Image (spheres, rainbow, N blue to C red):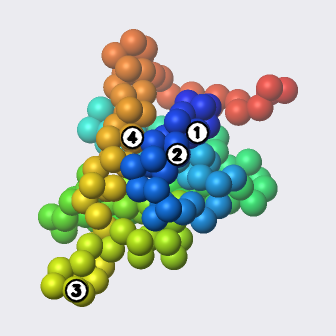
Amino acid sequence: MIEAKDAWPTIYKSLKKSFKKKFVVKNETMAAFDLALAAIVQDLQAVKNLFPTEQAERIEEWVLEFIDSKDYWGEYAVNEVKKYGEIFQNEIQTGGDPLSVIPGCLLHRWLGENIKNFDVEMNGKKTGVISPILLMMVSSTLIAFLGTWKRLKDKFKLVEGDLPLNETS
């Protein structure tokens, strides 16, 4: 989350420079947070391939527990991570494009109604397809956040346990 917060100003500046007045973020305060959530859920998808099923499920539960701060933002965060994960898995199961689904969801969060500024037109008609250039830029941005779970698996042996999530336990 810290990496996303720190990277957001540079990412935003780059997107504004590339797309000028078309790139209008709905809520700048939430944009870095939404970036962090998208990065978390995208990297979390690798857990299913890196760890045995039961262990992967426990890791996912710990991540959800960790981001659920018991306030509005926690509920929002958990719901977003679950929704993005479900959409990603659905794309895999239906033979869709799982690699662009999280960047697409993130763009909808960032832009809201302004996503229409990036609707591809063919023969003068809107297609409902997000600009592939914008989608590629956001995809490559999210790729920079990948690898946490792979590095953890390579460096440490994760064992089942009941870790306390607060400093007093």
User: Which residue bears the numbered disc 2?
Assistant: 12
The residue type indicated by label 3 comes to Gly
Q: Do labels 2 and 1 touch, CB within 8 Å? A: yes
Q: Residue at x 38, y 20 (%)?
A: 151
Mark 2 and mark 4 lie on one chain; the one further toward the N terminus is 2
Q: CA distance from mark 1 to mark 3?
A: 34 Å
Q: Residue at x 49, y 51 (%)?
A: 16
From the image, state whether disc 3 or disc 2 is nearer to you: 3
Q: CA distance from mark 3 to mark 2?
A: 29 Å
Q: CA distance from mark 3 to mark 4?
A: 30 Å
Furthest-top residue in this view: 155
Residue closer to the observer: 117 or 94: 117
Mark 3 and mark 4 lie on one chain; the one further toward the N terminus is 3
Tell me, yes or no, if residue 89 can be seen here. Answer: no
User: Which residue bears the numbered disc 3?
Assistant: 124
User: Which residue bears the numbered disc 4?
Assistant: 141
Furthest-right residue in this view: 168
Q: Do labels 3 and 2 touch, CB within 8 Å? A: no
Q: Residue at x 84, y 26 (%)?
A: 168
Q: CA distance from mark 2 to mark 1?
A: 5 Å
**Helix, strand or loop under label 4:** helix
The residue type indicated by label 1 comes to Pro
Instruction: Classify mark 4: residues with Cα within 10 Å, few (<14), some (14-19) or many (20+).
Output: some
Tell me, yes or no, if residue 29 can be seen here. Answer: yes
Q: Residue at x 56, y 40 (%)?
A: 8
User: Which residue bears the numbered disc 1?
Assistant: 9
Where residue 79 appears, x then y in whole percent?
57, 62
Q: CA distance from mark 2 to mark 4?
A: 11 Å
Q: Is residue 10 above or below residue 12?
A: above
